[in-house]
């Protein structure tokens, strides 16, 4: 388990300024959870397939 704790003087910070901290927290949580599930974060599908959410989009191979 991981704990992210802010200092006490962060209590008067506007919520909009805390957004990047929440994003970092969510990214770290997803990263460590995927490692825990033995899923590689850089390649979630071992076969290299990409699920297409939008139809009509062509994905070209990177050269």
Image (tube, helix red, strand yellow):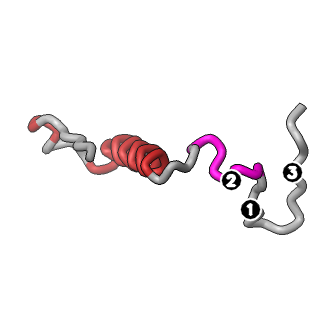
Which mark is drawn over residue 45?
2
Residue 34 left/right relative to 15:
right
Residue name at image x 19 percent, y 40 percent: 5
Q: Nearer the viewer, residue 55 or 19?
A: 55
Locate residue 2, reporting x and y percent.
27, 43
Q: Nearer the viewer, residue 26 or 13?
A: 26
Quadrant of residue 6 in the image? Answer: top left
Residue 2 left/right relative to 10:
right
Name the residue tied to disc 3. 59
Q: Is the C-beta separation of discs 1 and 2 under 8 Å?
A: yes
The residue range painted magenta reads 41-48
Q: Mark 1 to mark 2: distance in Å?
A: 9 Å
Q: Nearer the viewer, residue 11 or 43?
A: 43
Which mark is drawn over residue 51?
1
Give the dominant element type of the magenta stretch: helix, strand or loop.
loop
Question: Between disc 1 and disc 2, whose residue precedes?
Answer: 2
Q: Is residue 55 magenta?
A: no
Residue name at image x 76 percent, y 56 percent: 50
Q: Residue furthest top?
A: 63
Question: Between disc 3 and disc 2, whose residue precedes?
Answer: 2
Q: Is residue 46 magenta?
A: yes
Looking at the rendered structure, the secondary structure element under dot 2 is loop
Q: Residue furthest front?
A: 38
Local packing at callout 1 (Cα closer than 10 Å; few below 14, some 14-19, many 20+) is few
Q: Is the C-beta separation of discs 1 and 3 under 8 Å?
A: no
Residue name at image x 77 percent, y 63 percent: 52
> Which quarter shows the C terminus?
top right
Residue 61 left/right relative to 5:
right
User: Would you place residue 55 above or below residue 12 in this image?
Assistant: below
Q: Is the C-beta separation of discs 3 and 2 under 8 Å?
A: no
Q: Mark 3 to mark 2: distance in Å?
A: 16 Å
Q: Nearer the viewer, residue 20 or 26?
A: 26
């Amino acid at each position: 388990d991981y704990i992210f704790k802010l200092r006490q003087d962060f209590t008067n910070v506007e919520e909009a300024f805390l957004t990047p901290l929440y994003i970092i927290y969510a990214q770290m949580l997803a990263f460590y959870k995927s490692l825990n599930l033995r899923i590689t974060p850089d390649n979630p599908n071992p076969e290299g397939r990409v699920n297409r959410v939008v139809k009509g989009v062509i994905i070209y191979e990177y050269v």
